Image: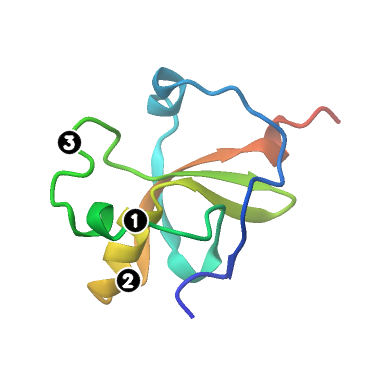
Amino acid sequence: MIFKAVQEGRPYPDHAFSTRDWASVPPRSVRLDELITTKRELALDTLLDEDSTFYGDLFPHAVQWGGEIYLEDGLHRALRAALQQRTTIHVRVLDLDELKPR
């Protein structure tokens, strides 16, 4: 299995992070089989597009919530990594578990 699970939608609360906010989250290496996708479908043309990240962040965005890591943005980049037989990718992970009030 490439990903830990595939589901539709985000089970975590809205974090209201902007593109600028995401840039402050340092990327880290994450195993593909630890990621849960938040999209069930992908666009084949986007998967095959060499310039798909030209105007965006090079790193996928994920949210850690309830001890799980949800891939919020970057499904196509993660799948391309899997097709290249890579088992890890660099991802910006926003840890909502850490930000939860105690």
**Are the two marked residues, 3 and 1, in contact with CB atoms closer than 8 angstroms?**
no
Residue 88 or 5: which is nearer the viewer?
5
Residue 47 position within the rendered picture, expressed as x and y whole percent measured from the top left: 26, 58
Work out which residue is located at the far bottom of the displayed protein and give it.
1
- The residue that mark 3 highlights is 54
- Of badges 3 and 1, nearer the viewer stands 1
| Nearer-N-terminus badge (3/1) | 1
How many residues crowd mark 3 within 10 Å: few (<14), some (14–19), many (20+)? few
Amino acid at pointer 2:
Ala
SS for dot 3:
loop
Q: What is the three-letter code of the residue carrying label 1?
A: Ala
Residue at image location 21% in from the left, 44% down from the top:
52
Q: Position of residue 70 (x, y in %)?
A: 58, 52
Residue 88: x %, y % from top left: 37, 65
Q: Residue at x 86, y 31 (%)?
A: 102
Disc 2 designates what residue?
A: 82
Q: Is residue 41 above or below residue 87?
A: above
Other-residue count near label 1 (Cα within 10 Å), few / some / many at <14 / 14–19 / ≥20: few
Residue that protrudes farthest toward the left in the picture: 50
Name the side, left or right, on which 34 lies relative to 58.
Answer: right
Question: Helix or strand or loop: what does disc 2 sit on?
Answer: helix
First in residue order: circle 1 vs circle 2: 1
Indicate the position of residue 96 as horizontal and vertical percent values.
Answer: 67, 37
Residue identifier under label 1: 43
